[in-house]
Structures are given as structure tokens and as C-alpha cells.
Amino acid sequence: MHPFEQLGGRLLVIFDGHCGLCDRAVRWLVARDRGDRLRFAASASPLVAALLERNGFSATPEASAPGTILVVTAPGEPAERVLVRSAAVIALLGELPRPWPAFAWVLGLVPMILRDAGYRLVARFRYRIWGRLESCPLPTPEQRGKFLESPRSISPD
């Protein structure tokens, strides 16, 4: 079985498992993904290494975080597409139940250059503001099915 067959048309969210902001964002998304449209994998996961490399991102442990959240549509397929920064955020909000698709639509009205500048500003200071986790937290038993590969480390608080 291909490692991404279990996605079944869902979006794959690749995140920095050591970033406090990213951890909070993933928890927020998991809690709101009532339509079961998202799956998650840490950027340091061996499962996504080839996907990162073929799309121009480093998959080495010391540089595993591509500096942005990535959203992959149709991973492993010819139609594979990687969305980054604000485009990824818009795609994620669009998959959540109301009112989040409306927020995605409004955010889409803002020119990408401005959206991405705001995203980069937050990303630049994310470790200083939200901290750096020593290891990627484990999902709860109820959340495990949303993660392609369970991060190996500490349990959630």
C-alpha cells in the first residue's frame, strides 16, 4: 500500500513539530475538523521526507522545518500540489465547517504579497513568542487517526 493511500482525498498538513505555534494550530485544526477532511504529519517525519524533497524542501533533521506550514493535495499522485504560507491557511480554513470558509474567502481577497508578508512576520518570531518544543507532542488516542505517523515523544498535556 502506498503511504498516502490512507488519505482518501483529504488534505495533508505538514507542520513543524517543534514549534509551539504550529502545535497549537494543529490542535485547533483537529478540534474543528468535524468533516474529517485533514490529516497531519510532522515535517521531520520519515514518511514525508520524499514528498518534501521532490517539492524543493529540505528533509534533513536539522533543516526539517520548511519555515511554513504546508498543505498537500493529492500527495503521491501526478496531481500532487503543495500550498505554502497564506495559501495553505486559506485551503485549511476552506475545509472546516462554517464560519471558517467565509474567513478563507475574505482572506483570499487580500493580495497574496500582503498575506504572505504577514505570514512571514509571524513565522520569523514564532519560536520567540510561542517557544520551541523539545519534541513533537503525541496526539491523544482519539486524535491518532488524524496523524499519518504518530510523532515519537512526549504525551499531550
Image: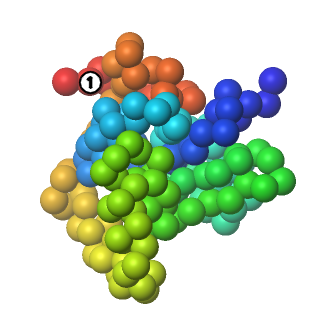
Crowd around label 1: few <14 · some 14–19 · many ≥20 (10 Å): few
Quadrant of the snapshot with the N terminus: top right
Q: How many marks?
A: 1
| Residue furthest top in the image | 141
In the depicted structure, whether residue 17 falls above or below residue 79: above
In the depicted structure, whether residue 75 falls above or below residue 105: above
In the depicted structure, whether residue 6 falls above or below residue 121: above
Q: What residue sits 57% from the left and 30% below the top? A: 148
| Residue 82 position within the rendered picture, expressed as x and y whole percent measured from the top left | 62, 60
Which quadrant of the view contains residue 106? bottom left
As helix, strand or loop, the secondary structure at mark 1 comes to: loop
| Residue 97 position within the rendered picture, expressed as x and y whole percent measured from the top left | 38, 43
Q: What residue sits 68% from the left and 32% below the top? A: 8
| Residue 58 position within the rendered picture, expressed as x and y whole percent measured from the top left | 60, 59
Quadrant of the snapshot with the C terminus: top left
Q: Is residue 2 visible?
A: yes
31 lies left or right of 77: left
Q: What residue sits 16% from the left and 59% below the top? A: 129
Taking depth in this image into account, of 114 and 22 the one nearest to the observer is 114
| Residue 56 position within the rendered picture, expressed as x and y whole percent measured from the top left | 67, 65
Q: How is the image coloured?
A: rainbow
Q: Amino acid at mark 1?
A: Pro
Q: Is residue 132 visible?
A: no
Residue located beneath label 1 in the image: 156
80 lies left or right of 143: right
Q: What residue sits 31% from the left and 51% below the top? A: 99
Taking depth in this image into account, of 155 and 7 the one nearest to the observer is 7
